[in-house]
Amino acid sequence: MTQDRENLEQLWHNFKQKQDLEARDRLIDEYIPLVKYLAGRLAINLPSCVEFGDLESFGFFGLLDALEKYDPARNVKFETYASQRIRGAILDGLRASDWVPRSTRSKGRVLENKIQELTNRLGRNPSDEELAAALDLSREAYYEMLDEVKGANLLSLDETVTRDDNGDQFSILEVVADQGDPVDHRLLRQETVRELEIAVAALSEREQLVLSLYYHQELTLKEIGHVLEVSESRISQIHTKAVLTLKQKLKNVERRD
């Protein structure tokens, strides 16, 4: 942060109470690094055909939206509130641009359906070996399939679970990652939270660790690879399978609603 707390509070007061546009511009300057940071983290899992500048542009509109709708009286840190809006705006922009090839989407659905089929049959989440065998693929071809669908399924954990009266969206990631946040607990039905907690707990220890390090500790996939002493590519594959598995669980929760 370039501003100290007192100055920030004054800027927020001037913007919200006096509609001071200069104060708004200074707040934008203060928080624009958050847009760059979130765009950078999302870009790691996207193909090179997706322009980083586009991600920043999508995120900038999310920041503007957050500035307008943020209520300091709600006692929620702006960074927390804005991160949801910025990330959501970037993902909405990606969805609208429809950059994922149809063949890649089709492979993603095949993987999701096979995970659900095996989970129902085995009574637990399938291993990589079991999935590869069920798909009649070699281990190498199975991993190549995971690599191909990773970008498309980056969006999966951000599927909306519910929204509040202000239009704030809450995703599976936020439900699972922010269990201590009283705002989320007040807005989300406890049954949904419990279902998602169970889904995460059913993942393998390594899958849970990768999600925790990536989404909670905010390590990059390369950094996680160093921690677990495997390649960045392997971490990406573990991440993709975990996301696909949770996506299926989320669909099952939604079907019962």
Image: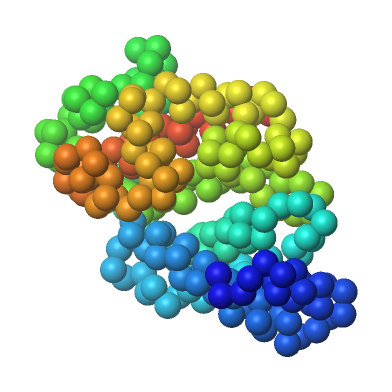
Against 195, residue 99 (above or below) is below
Residue 244 visible here:
no
Q: Residue at x 37, y 74 (%)?
A: 51
- Which of these two is toward me, 127 or 22? 22
Query: Residue 160: which quarter of the image?
Result: top right
Q: Residue at x 46, y 33 (%)?
A: 246
Residue 98 location (% of width, % of height):
45, 63
Query: Residue 135: which quarter of the image?
Result: top left
Q: How many marks?
A: 0
> Considering the image in quadrants, where does the C terminus appear?
top right
- Which of these two is toward me, 164 or 2? 2
> Considering the image in quadrants, where does the N terminus appear?
bottom right
Q: Is residue 94 left or right of residue 132?
A: right
Query: Residue 24: which quarter of the image?
Result: bottom right
Residue 181 location (% of width, % of height):
66, 39
Q: Is residue 243 left or right of residue 191?
A: left
Q: Residue at x 38, y 25 (%)?
A: 203
Residue 189 location (% of width, % of height):
72, 30
Against 217, residue 43 (above or below) is below
- Which of these two is toward me, 62 or 146? 62
